[in-house]
Amino acid sequence: MLVACGPATSIDDSGDLGTSGDATDDSGGESTADASTAADSTGNAVCEALFDEEVGAASTVILRNDTTTPLFVGVETPCQATPFHILGPDDGPLQWMRGDCAISCRSVLADECFDCGPCDGPKIIRIEPGATYEQTWLGNFFADQSIPSECDGSPCQPQCEQRTLAPDGDYMLRAEVRSDCLAISPKQCECPEGESSCVVTSNQGLAPVTAEVDGVLSHPGGTVELVFQ
C-alpha cells in the first residue's frame, strides 16, 4: 500500500541530498547583470517580458521507503532525475524543472548560446529500505516560448524556456515507483558507499512503473511526505 502523509519534522541521514543540483540548479536563474545586458540589447518591452520571473518560496517533498527492498523513484525524462509530477487542474503534469538542455529566454537575448551535447541516459532516484530522499521545489514552473521577430538577431535558437512564479495553493503530487534500474553495469544503479539514497543512471531506459503514490503539497512553505509501503 502507498500512502501520502502530512508535514514531516525530521528526516534520516540522507536528507542532505535534498539540496542537490536537481532542486536548485534547475531553477534556471541568471544574474541581474545578465538580465540588464539583455534588456539593454533589445530595448523592447516585448522582449523583456520573456525574462525569467523571480524564484519562488521553497516547499519540501520527502520520499520515504518503508519497504524492505530498494526502490527506484522518478518520472520519465530523457536525462535529468525528476522525482515526481506536479499535476495541473486537468491532472496533466506541469513542468516544474527546467527541461533537459533548455535555455532561458533572457540567455538567448543575451547571446549566451550553448551546446549541451548528449547525456548518458535517464536518471532515477534509488532509495534504500527505511531511507528518505528530500527534494526542494522553489515554487516555479517553466513555459516554452519562442523569441518574437522584433527581438531576433541572436545567434542562438529562438526556442527557449521562461521561468514563471507558481500561484500559492495546494498542488497534487504523484511519484512513480519502479522496482528495478536498467543499466549496462549494475554498479551504475548503486549509491556510493555510505549513502542511503542517491541519483543513479538507468542508461538502458526505465523499468515499468509498479506503483504510484499521490500527495498534496501546500505551497508556499509546505512539506509533504510520500511514503512507499
Image (cartoon, rainbow, N blue to C red):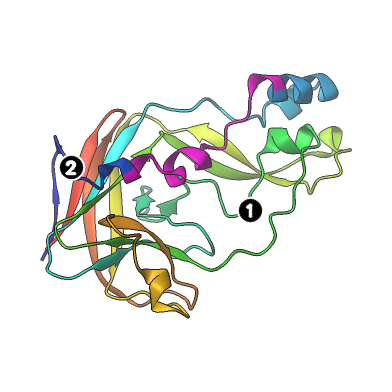
In the displayed image of the protein, which residue is found farthest to the front?
Answer: 193
The numbered mark, 1 or 2, whose residue comes first in the sequence reads 2
* Residue at 42%, 42% in the rendered image: 23
Q: Is residue 205 left or right of residue 58?
A: right
Residue 9, percent from left and from top: 14, 34
Task: Give the numbered dot on residue 212.
Answer: none
Rendered image quadrant of residue 43? top right
In this rendering, is residue 118 above or below 63?
below
Amino acid of disc 2: Ile
Q: For the residues carrying marks 1 and 2, which lies nearer the camera in this image? A: 2
- Magenta stretch, residue numbers: 17-33
Residue 186, percent from left and from top: 39, 77
Q: Nearer the viewer, residue 61 or 87?
A: 61
Amino acid of disc 1: Cys
In this rendering, is residue 179 above or below 220?
below
Residue beneath label 2, please? 11
Mark 1 burial class by Cα count in 10 Å: few <14, some 14-19, many 20+: some
In the displayed image of the protein, which residue is found farthest to the right?
Answer: 153
* Residue at 77%, 44% in the rendered image: 113
Residue beneath label 1, please? 101
Label 1 element class: loop
- For the C terminus, the image quarter is bottom left
Q: Mark 1 to mark 2: distance in Å?
A: 32 Å
Verify whether residue 31 appears in magenta.
yes
Verify whether residue 147 appears in magenta.
no
